Image (spheres, helix red, strand yellow):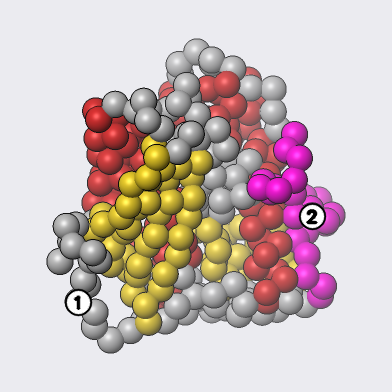
Amino acid sequence: MGIGDDAAVLASQAGSLVWSIDAAVEGTHFRRDLMSLEDAGYRATMAALSDLAAMGSEPLGVLAALVLPRDLADESLLELARGQRDAAATSGTFVVGGNLARGDCISITTTVLGRAERPLTRGDAADGHAVWVSGELGWSAAGLRALERSSAPSPDVDRAITCFRRPTARIEAGRVAAAAGASAAIDVSDGLAADLTHLARESQVTVVLEEDALFDAPLTRLAESLGAAALDLVLSGGEDYALVVTAPASVVLPGFRRIGVCAAGPAAVMLRDGSGRARAVGGRGYDHFAEQP
């Protein structure tokens, strides 16, 4: 049973139930001058569903708690809801309920429920395991920068803005990785360096990234036009919602590309350049409770 009663009712089969919750607050996570409310609803829903992807789980349902200002028109609410609906449908699930309340700005809190045969965690990477990624890195941050600078339209700018406004939760990639024998996983929300630092700490490994594998010529070209470095966009830009997984060397993950390796050592993220020199990256990225640049 869906919307209309005091709670939704879901039929469940065998397997682990996986829950997550995510908040998107106007002025902190999105701005109405940079995206439509339909984009905001879509993006908030995908961000929550991305947590299910990182656990290798299949979505069962979505709940949304909305805080809305008094002057928000009904059509604006329907626009936001269309984005939520479309994001859920794209991921093979539905919005099954939620709550409405009044407040000073729009806030979208999304709860997602999934099912996993073998939930992936951040804590099982090991020495010698390869690091793989599914999805774009750095393009969302480039899209935000392009919008803020009112960059002229071009194929690369349009691609970046789409990545920012309409990210994709890598649900199928997470399930493929879990079935193939991946050891650990995390989605990239706060920046590749920050999120991989979490994985490195939970698994007690050093993650060594290959710089040449992180980005390509189109992102380099776009970053330069935006006055940025492609490497910075990849490592600390965030909101890519790409899926990073580790797996034993014998495991090949279709639809992923290899970007590094795990090594024995202190919990850290290192970056190795084309000459073989490695340097510490640190956990730079978005922090809700720190001063942002």
Q: Which residue is mark 2?
A: 282
Cα gap from disc 2 to disc 1, whole angstroms: 44 Å
Q: Which residue is mark 1?
A: 11
Question: What amino acid does circle 1 point to?
Answer: Ala
The location of residue 120, given as percent across then percent down, is 49, 75
Q: Is residue 79 left or right of residue 137?
A: left
Residue ID at (19%, 76%): 11
- Tell which circle, 2 or 1, labels the residue nearer the N-terminal end: 1
Q: Does the rendering let one see residue 87?
A: yes
Q: Does the rendering let one see residue 255?
A: no
When asked about the image quadrant of residue 14, the answer is bottom left
Q: Nearer the viewer, residue 213 or 205?
A: 205
Residue 141 marker: none
Q: Which residues are magenta?
A: 265-293
For disc 1, the neighbor class at 10 Å (few under 14, some 14 to 19, many from 20) is few
Q: Nearer the viewer, residue 157 or 284?
A: 284
Q: Is residue 156 left or right of residue 217?
A: left
Question: What amino acid does circle 2 point to?
Answer: Gly
Is residue 109 within the magenta segment?
A: no
Q: Tag 2's secondary structure?
A: loop
Dominant secondary structure of the residues highlighted in magenta in the image: loop
Q: Is residue 277 left or right of residue 129?
A: right
Residue at the farthest bottom position: 14
